[in-house]
Image (spheres, rainbow, N blue to C red):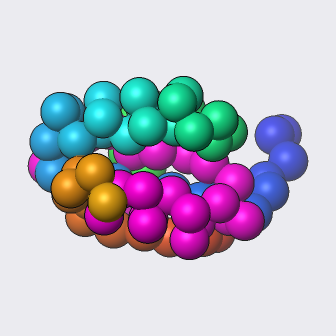
């Protein structure tokens, strides 16, 4: 069984927003990747960002600055 670790999960309303997150992360060297949205979260596009919990504040600030929308943000064992 895979060991669960504390993880930042951000869901997005559109695929364009999810893809924008991926580009922002790459440019700003934020560790993470796009994943299918977990069953316990809602989303419009089916994609979510899985990243490090310690990057939550920086990530959300960059998304706000770049006018990228998100739906839910959770830090949990995943």
- The image quadrant of residue 42 is bottom left
Q: Which part of the image, by quadrant, shows the C terminus?
A: bottom right
Labels in figure, total: 0
In x, y percent, where is residue 17? Answer: 22, 41
Q: Residue at x 31, y 64 (%)?
A: 64
Residue 53 lies in the magenta stretch: yes
| Above or below for 67 versus 37 | below
In x, y percent, where is residue 38? Answer: 43, 50
Q: Residue at x 30, y 35 (%)?
A: 20
- The image quadrant of residue 75 is bottom right
Residue 74 lies in the magenta stretch: no
Region in magenta? 40-64
Residue 3 in view, yes or no? yes
Name the foreground residue: 23 vs 18.
Answer: 23
| Above or below for 9 versus 20 | below
Q: Residue at x 44, y 65 (%)?
A: 60
* 1 with respect to 20 (left or right): right
Name the foreground residue: 72 vs 37.
Answer: 72
Q: Residue at x 64, y 69 (%)?
A: 76
Name the foreground residue: 5 vs 53.
Answer: 53
- The image quadrant of residue 37 is top left
* 40 with respect to 76 (left or right): left
């Amino acid at each position: 069984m895979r060991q669960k670790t504390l993880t930042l999960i951000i869901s997005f309303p559109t695929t364009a927003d999810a893809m924008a997150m991926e580009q922002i992360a790459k440019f700003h060297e934020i560790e993470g990747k796009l994943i299918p949205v977990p069953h316990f979260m809602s989303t419009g596009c089916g994609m979510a960002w899985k990243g490090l919990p310690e990057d939550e504040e920086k990530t959300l600030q960059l998304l706000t600055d770049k006018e990228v929308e998100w739906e839910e943000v959770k830090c949990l064992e995943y």
